[in-house]
Image (cartoon, grey):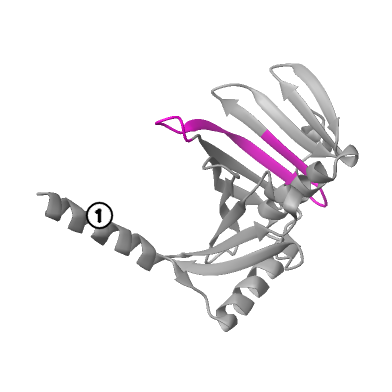
Amino acid sequence: MKTKIALLILFISGSLLAQEQKMSAAEIAAFKEDVNVVSKKIKTLSTDFVQYKHLDFLSKDIETSGKMNFKEPNLLQWQYKKPYNYSIVFKNGKILINDEGKKSAVDIGNSKIFARINKLIIGSVSGNMFDDKEFTISYFKLKGQNLAKFIPKDATLKKYIKQIELTFDKEEATVVQVKLLESSEDYTRIVLKNKVINAKIDDSVFSN
């Protein structure tokens, strides 16, 4: 029985590994070009999201959901609706927080690490973050999707984020999942769905 279980585990592991194949240089170039062409066309983006927070000491991931709005060049709102109302807005060099009506603000300009994280989040939403100076990047093919893994080169940033994984829809060349791996075994996985691109979004959405 133990042998059968061991063989089953090996089979499943092998199947999962087989799904993730490294891209060739030509495939990487074509993929980056597709993403850059699409990201340049994105003026606004609105999408539902489900966020899964994995903490090593918990048996079950913490699940939250809501809506994300982006407007170029750098207006970004994450509005959590379940199981609580909480919103974060990145605007004019500040992070505006509204926690059940209790409002606060953080000046990004006072912290290089906040500025970098802000740039990362906006880049991950638009798909435009292929910066070899900032990251060591590896590219993989999945069934119907492409995967880019980013390892920060900056030692300070690495203390907060060990790796960023962006999963792209192969046909649309847009981000469908963001995974942030922390320096520990904890990670955050955000699944984007019901995307609406270039619909009108009023500036008041980002007032928080």
Where is the C terminus found, in terms of image quarters? Answer: top right
Q: Position of residue 51 (x, y in %)?
A: 54, 38
**Principal SS element in the magenta part?**
strand
Q: Where is residue 23 in the image (x, y as percent from the top left)?
A: 52, 75
Answer with left or right where residue 53 lies relative to residue 123. left
Task: Inspect the image, locate mark 1, and give the three-letter code of the amino acid beneath it.
Answer: Ile
Looking at this view, is 160 or 174 the one in front?
160
Task: Please determine whether, in this image, residue 100 is positioned above or below residue 194.
Answer: above
Secondary structure under tag 1 reads helix
Q: Is residue 199 visible?
A: no
Q: Where is residue 186 in the image (x, y as percent from the top left)?
A: 53, 40
Answer with left or right where residue 107 lies relative to residue 143. right
Residue visible at 54% across and 23% down?
83
Examine the structure image and report whether residue 105 is included in the region drawn in magenta. no
Task: Please determine whether, in this image, residue 129 is positioned above or below residue 48.
Answer: below
Q: Position of residue 103 (x, y in %)?
A: 79, 20
Instruction: From the image, tell me which residue sits under label 1.
Output: 9
Q: In which quarter of the image is residue 172?
A: bottom right
Residue visible at 68% across and 50% down?
158
Examine the structure image and report whether residue 58 is included in the region drawn in magenta. yes
The residue range painted magenta reads 56-78
Task: Please determine whether, in this image, residue 174 is positioned above or below residue 26.
Answer: above
